[in-house]
Amino acid sequence: MNTRIDMQVINGIRYRPEDAPRHAAPTPTPEAPATAPTPETPAAEPVAGVLTADEAAASTKSAKTTKKEG
């Protein structure tokens, strides 16, 4: 008369439901990956006095040509 008893596994140890320690959590479940919040892409607003790399290169080229001409 082999009756199958549902065993509860806690930290790798099998317990009958009535013998399981009450304070122990059932079999540890893998943590669900936290969904990363989608970052809001801020609108690129030009800042006064700040040049982009292309603007800086163009201004240095124009400065060099004006020095040679003058």
Image (cartoon, rainbow, N blue to C red):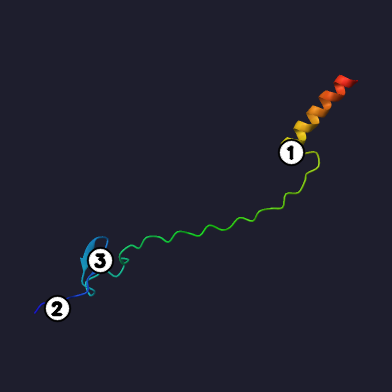
Q: Please, what is the three-letter code of the amino acid marked with disc 2?
A: Thr
Q: Are marks 2 and 3 in contact (CB under 8 Å)?
A: no
Mark 2 burial class by Cα count in 10 Å: few <14, some 14-19, many 20+: few
Where is residue 49 drawn, in percent x and y?
80, 38
Q: Is residue 52 above or below residue 70?
A: below
* Residue bearing mark 1: 52
Q: CA distance from mark 2 to mark 3?
A: 18 Å
* Residue bearing mark 3: 9
Q: Using residue 19 as the reference point, say whether residue 53 is left or right of it.
A: right
* Residue at the extreme right: 70
- Residue at figure coordinates x 22%, y 62% from the top left: 13
Q: How many marks?
A: 3
- Residue at figure coordinates x 30%, y 64% from the top left: 27
Q: Nearer the viewer, residue 5 or 36?
A: 36
Query: The residue tagged with tag 1: helix, strand or loop?
Result: loop
| Quadrant of the snapshot with the C terminus | top right
Q: Please, what is the three-letter code of the amino acid marked with disc 1?
A: Thr
Please name which of the two marks, 2 or 3, marks the residue nearer to the observer.
2
Query: The residue tagged with tag 3: helix, strand or loop?
Result: strand
Where is residue 19 drawn, in percent x and y?
21, 72
